[in-house]
Amino acid sequence: MINEKNTTAISGYLSFVVLLAGLGLAAYGIYGQSVWLIAIGIVLALVILKGWLVVNPNESAVLILFGSYQGTVRKDGFFWVNPLVVKRTVSLKARNLDGQKIKVNDKLGNPIEIAAVVVWQVRDTAKALFAVDDYSKYVQIQSEAAVRHLANQFAYDNFEDEAAVISLKDGAQQVSGILEKELNDRLAMAGIDVIEARITHLAYAPEIASAMLQRQQATAVVSARRQIVDGAVGMVEMALEKLSEKDIVQLDEERKAAMVSNLLVVLCGERNVAPVVNAGTLYH
């Protein structure tokens, strides 16, 4: 595989002096009516003009001579190179790839919509031009493939897969790191460096979004109820211990059961409790 190699070029300002000399020679040939001087001067000027090369900041020029890679000029400025060389400009600027939303199944088989943004730049100009057909298109296709593979590796959330350490919804930082690493591995052969990769859109597919929302709401309600019950049981236990410790009242098992029932109703109920005064005893 061809790897990038840096090359230097002659200053373009020096060649400009040679151009002026060629034009002067042609003018002198016209004055002296010398066809040879005119021809030499014009050919020299055309050779100089054909070899001029301008490299802008954050750009590079790949030089190819008769199908052979000669090197890459990375230094910005005005240069002159062999006029027979084919010059191909490659941008070294960071670029954004705003991926389209794609539908894919997550680890549990649920259809989801996912999209990612990728910040990338060319690291090796030779690989970018010669290892793949179109490196920009290659980045786009490989990015989509990496996002699909990422979605297949993890569940959308951990409601169904409680043992999952990372989920697409809650593990944004870890998921972005995994995506960035996979993209760097995929794009290395094209001489592309991935600077950053992040998920920009994540949602259930429309056909199951409503059902998943209801499931999440039900899960949240069950979780809240579980916490309320745990707290209520703890408070009832503490109340019984305090009553027994301070010997405020002696309760048999039946009275304890009634007290526990009443306290749980008070603590776990959603509405305010209306007290009922019992004028008799528990047994009448």
Image (cartoon, rainbow, N blue to C red):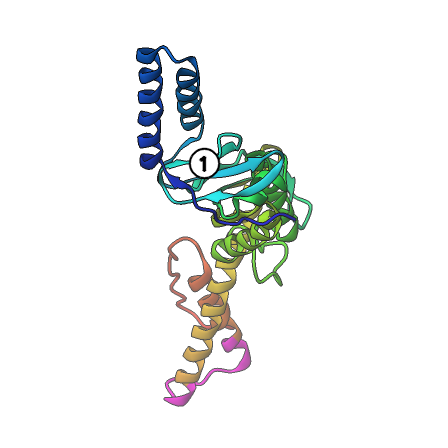
Residue 245 horizontal side relative to residue 218, left or right: left
Q: Is residue 57 magenta?
A: no
Residue at the (33%, 36%) spot, across then down: 14
Q: Position of residue 33 (x, y in %)?
A: 36, 10
Residue at the (52%, 62%) spot, across then down: 226
Numbered circles on residues, count: 1
Q: Is residue 251 magenta?
A: yes
Mark 1 highlights which residue? 81
Observer able to see residue 112: no
Q: Nearer the viewer, residue 64 or 201?
A: 64
Residue at the (44%, 21%) spot, across then down: 43
Observer able to see residue 41: yes
Q: Secondary structure at mark 1?
A: loop
Q: Position of residue 272 (x, y in %)?
A: 37, 55
Q: Position of residue 270 (x, y in %)?
A: 43, 54
Q: Nearer the viewer, residue 96 or 30?
A: 30
- Farthest residue toward the right? 109
Up/down of 169 relative to 82, above or below: below
Region in magenta = 244-256
Q: Position of residue 219 (x, y in %)?
A: 55, 52
Residue at the (49%, 53%) spot, across then down: 172
Q: In terms of image quadrants, where is residue 212?
A: top right
Up/down of 201 relative to 230, above or below: above
Q: In terms of image quadrants, where is residue 49?
A: top left
Q: Nearer the viewer, residue 82 or 177?
A: 82
Q: Amino acid at mark 1?
A: Val
